[in-house]
Image (tube, rainbow, N blue to C red):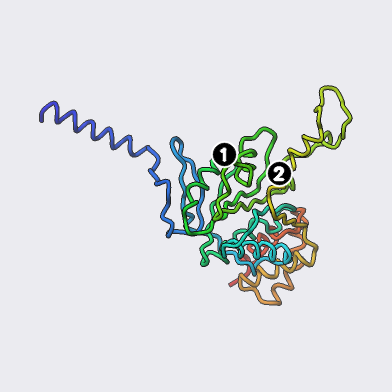
Amino acid sequence: MTPLEQFLQRAEALLQRVEAVLPPSYPREPDWKRSFAFRWRKRGTGASYLQPVVHVSQIALDDLHNIAAQKQQIEQNTRQFVQGRPANNVLLTGARGTGKSSLIKACLNQFAPDGLRLIEVDKADLAELADIVDLVAGRPERFVIFCDDLSFEEGEGGYKALKVALDGGVSAQSDNVLIYATSNRRHLMPEKMSDNAGYTATGDGDLHPGETVEEKVSLSERFGLWLSFYPFKQDDYLDIVGHWLRSFGCDDAQVESARGDALRWALQRGSRSGRVAWQFAKDYAGKLPE
């Protein structure tokens, strides 16, 4: 073997070892037929890409109990959107575990056959919203950009990017994109006692405190539809427990006998929410003898 052949052989072996540790290469545009839900992902270095979600949550609108008003509003808004009629960006706020995120996933399952698609974007990647909108603007599908459990601290970059994406930029918002966001905070930013100090100046305080308050509510006001969620009453919680137990194959007698355990489960967690009901039902039904 000549020295050149030895060099080429070693170079080939080195390239194989380097390729083995490099992250996989993804096209910026995904295979749109592979899924109806996607995640916006960022490589360690280089451009971001859309990753198809292979296993999408199968929750349906009928699985969500005791939020009838919120369900009707978001279902109607989403129907308008997939039919090409005017529709609003939606902000879902309120008590934890009451179905905010599940409602968006259920809408996706309801309207996916009509061309609805969902792109989940982490808060850390909101600065790339404009790139996402440009990527899907020419597609025939209708896209909901989903931002879950959203909240900001002062000075975070994603805050301004989201404001611009909603309706604050020079370019018009694409008519095949809406933003659905969930948060435990109605105004998406922490509110302080000092914000309510009116025009009382203390020390080196804000010269125009009213403007500070306006800035904090300006983002949430860009959402055309607000849906508020509240903690469930005891009977509502037990109704949800019963629904999920039946979905796991329990009969009425088993559902009735589980009521006491369900209440104790909620008491231990300090919450009567849909999430807690779901967790209890899985635990209870999983322990039943076959």
Picture coordinates of residue 143, whole percent (x, y): 54, 56
**Nearer the observer, 153 or 282:** 153
Picture coordinates of residue 283, whole percent (x, y): 64, 62
Which residue does the image show at 51% across and 50% down from the upper left? 39
What amino acid is labelled 1 in the image?
Ala
All told, the count of numbered labels is 2
Q: Quadrant of the C terminus?
A: bottom right
What amino acid is labelled 2 in the image?
Leu
Bin the neighbour count of mark 2 within 10 Å (Cα to Cα): few under 14, some 14-19, many 20 and up. Answer: many
- On the rendered structure, is 178 left or right of 23? right
The disc, 2 or 1, on the residue closer to the chain's N-terminal end is 1
Which residue does the image show at 53% across and 64% down from the upper left? 112
Picture coordinates of residue 107, whole percent (x, y): 60, 63
Q: Which residue is tagged 1?
A: 127
- The Cα atoms of the two marked residues, 2 and 1, are separated by 16 Å
Q: Which residue is tagged 2?
A: 188
- On the rendered structure, is 115 left or right of 169? left
